[in-house]
């Protein structure tokens, strides 16, 4: 009898305990419990991330994330010119010190800061390399053997003023991608096309058609997109 009474009390007490217990929320599909910031921050939502360093503002980095652009070293410049134009800058070594290359006697670190001396000698080298390559390509009939005028029709290049808009733009897209790694677009492509027409017209008036292509080549080399990475 005593055992039976004990069992009855236990049975009656269990629901009472269950009624006093705090309710458990049902698990919702796709829901996760919030996790604290492992870097020490106390914000689990947007805004500040505590110990995490935010990425730099793109507007402050000229559209780049990370470090600011760097100028090519003298060795990188030489390889880039030979790859893009099709022939090396033969006088580069004689201008290397003026362009910033260290001699490890008086100068221990290479200077990669832009300056007027660098710009002057770079334009001089670009004129020499681009004109020599343009003169050579005007005599090359096979477009596959050309570095600059590869998109132009087969045969000798005599008058670049006869090119239509499609041919001019195709050439500029090819050259900008070759020199900068990215094609011209939008209004900038239109401006470069106008520049190309003026260069071709002036070279024809001077009876030196090779200068038209050379002028475009020089402009591509001296652009900051060729000199920085």
Image: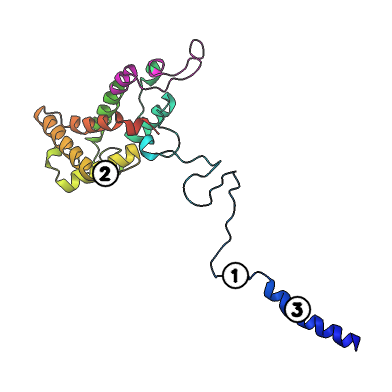
Find residue 162 and report its horizontal and vertical position in percent. Answer: 12, 42
- Which quadrant does the N terminus fall into? bottom right
Find residue 216 and report its horizontal and vertical position in percent. Answer: 23, 33
Earlier-in-chain disc, 2 versus 3: 3
* Mark 3 crowdedness (10 Å alpha carbons): few <14, some 14-19, many ≥20: few
State the image quarter where residue 174 is shown.
top left
Q: Nearer the viewer, mark 1 or mark 2?
A: 1
Find residue 4 and report its horizontal and vertical position in percent. Answer: 87, 88
Mark linked to residue 25 = 1
* Mark 1 crowdedness (10 Å alpha carbons): few <14, some 14-19, many ≥20: few
Relative to the observer, which residue lies in front, 185 or 208?
185
SS class, disc 3: helix
Question: Does residue 111 belong to the magenta stretch?
Answer: yes
Q: Is residue 90 above or below residue 155?
A: above
Earlier-in-chain disc, 3 versus 1: 3
Earlier-in-chain disc, 1 versus 2: 1
Residue plotted at (78% across, 83% down): 11
Marks 2 and 3, Cα distance to the nearest angstrom? 82 Å
Mark linked to residue 173 = 2
Residue contact between numbered discs 2 and 3, judged by CB atoms under 8 Å: no
Is any atom of residue 154 visible in this view? no
Side of 37 relative to 202 (left or right): right
SS class, disc 1: loop
The residue that mark 3 highlights is 14
Count of picture labels: 3
Mark linked to residue 147 = none
């Amino acid at each position: 009898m005593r055992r039976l009474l004990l069992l009855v009390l236990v049975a009656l007490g269990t629901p009472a305990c269950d009624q006093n217990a705090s309710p458990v929320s049902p698990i919702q599909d796709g829901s996760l419990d919030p996790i604290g910031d492992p870097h020490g921050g106390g914000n689990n939502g947007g805004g500040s991330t505590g110990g995490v360093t935010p990425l730099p503002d793109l507007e402050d980095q000229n559209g780049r994330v990370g470090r600011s652009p760097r100028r090519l070293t003298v060795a990188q410049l030489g390889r880039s010119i030979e790859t893009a134009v099709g022939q090396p800058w033969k006088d580069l070594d004689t201008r290397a010190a003026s362009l910033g290359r260290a001699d490890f006697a008086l100068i221990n670190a290479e200077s990669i800061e832009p300056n007027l001396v660098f710009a002057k000698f770079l334009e001089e080298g670009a004129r020499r390399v681009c004109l020599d390559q343009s003169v050579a390509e005007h005599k090359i009939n096979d477009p596959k053997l050309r570095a600059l005028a590869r998109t132009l029709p087969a045969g000798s290049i005599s008058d670049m003023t006869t090119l239509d808009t499609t041919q001019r733009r195709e050439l500029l897209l090819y050259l900008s991608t070759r020199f900068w790694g990215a094609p011209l677009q939008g209004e900038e492509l239109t401006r470069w096309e106008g520049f190309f027409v003026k260069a071709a017209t002036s070279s024809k008036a001077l009876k030196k058609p090779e200068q038209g292509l050379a002028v475009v080549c020089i402009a591509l080399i001296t652009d900051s997109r060729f000199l920085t990475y």
